Amino acid sequence: MSDQSPQPEFKVWAADDVVYGPVPLATLVQWIQDERVLGETWIYSVNGNRWNKAAELSELADAFAGRTGPKSDTATADTTLLVSGLRPGMLRRVKALATMNDQQLGRFVQLMEIARVEQYKTVVRQGAPGDAMYAVLDGEVRARIMAGGKETELARFGPGDIFGEMSLFDGGPRSADVVANSNSTLLRITAERFDRLCRDQPELANPLLFELAKSLAKRIRADDKKIADVFRMARVGGLD
């Protein structure tokens, strides 16, 4: 029989009304240093079977020593979401998410997937069935088409941009490849989960729908301009 005591583990009741964990003490200390866990955050001690505010736990006394609280109101809002692998503020780069409060944002991302894509990796392939939309949280990707072994770049997408949104509505084939220009973090929103969001939580879906409508309208206008420019050049060249 082992005489070793179990390592302390904790759960965190975050501002998005999601309980994260259990996590070891070292992880909890790191979250305090990152200001993701504040003195007022409720912590559940698995070993002690009790809830306490973080600042009241003896195990965290050294972690809070000398701290006077969050640096600013903005810092508090950006760092209380304990979404695995995301740096503070990354989610709010997406316009459709920027207006959500912490609770709404936490509920939203629990239905989505975080995809980390290495540089040069293909995210989606032209002609493949469209089953998800993406939002760029960090890094950069490009849309391209290949013809005769040569690449034509159509667009670049950086933090806050979205692509593949038509997939949420018609599931049609992808119109282009999307390739990572650098190591990137993407929020993947599948059509199936988006339908569920619209049905069960319309208050979360509406901001995204509004942003998608604006994005699609902008692209349609851009395409119309390109077509008009082609006809204008054809007339000038006497090709009509």
Image (cartoon, helix red, strand yellow):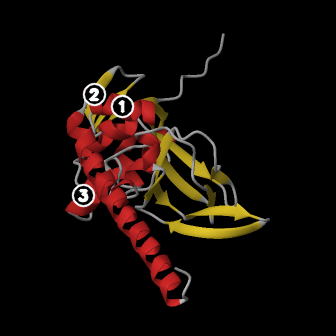
Disc marking residue 37: none
- Residue 129 coordinates in the image, percent (x, y): 58, 39
In the rendered image, the vertical position of residue 226 relative to residue 174, given as above or below: below
Specify which label sits upstream in the sequence, 2 or 3.
3
Quadrant in the picture for residue 18? top left
Q: Are marks 1 and 3 in contact (CB under 8 Å)?
A: no
Q: Secondary structure at mark 1?
A: helix
Give how far across and how far down residue 116 sits, in percent.
58, 50
Residue 69's label in the rendered image is 3
At 42% from the left edge and 22% from the top edge, which residue is drawn?
Answer: 47
User: In the drawing, does residue 105 fall left or right of residue 222?
Assistant: left
Q: Which residue is mark 2?
A: 199
> Cβ–Cβ below 8 Å for labels 2 and 1?
yes
Q: Secondary structure at mark 3?
A: loop
> From this viewpoint, which residue is outermost toward the right?
149
Other residues around mark 2 within 10 Å, as few (<14) / some (14–19) / many (≥20)? few
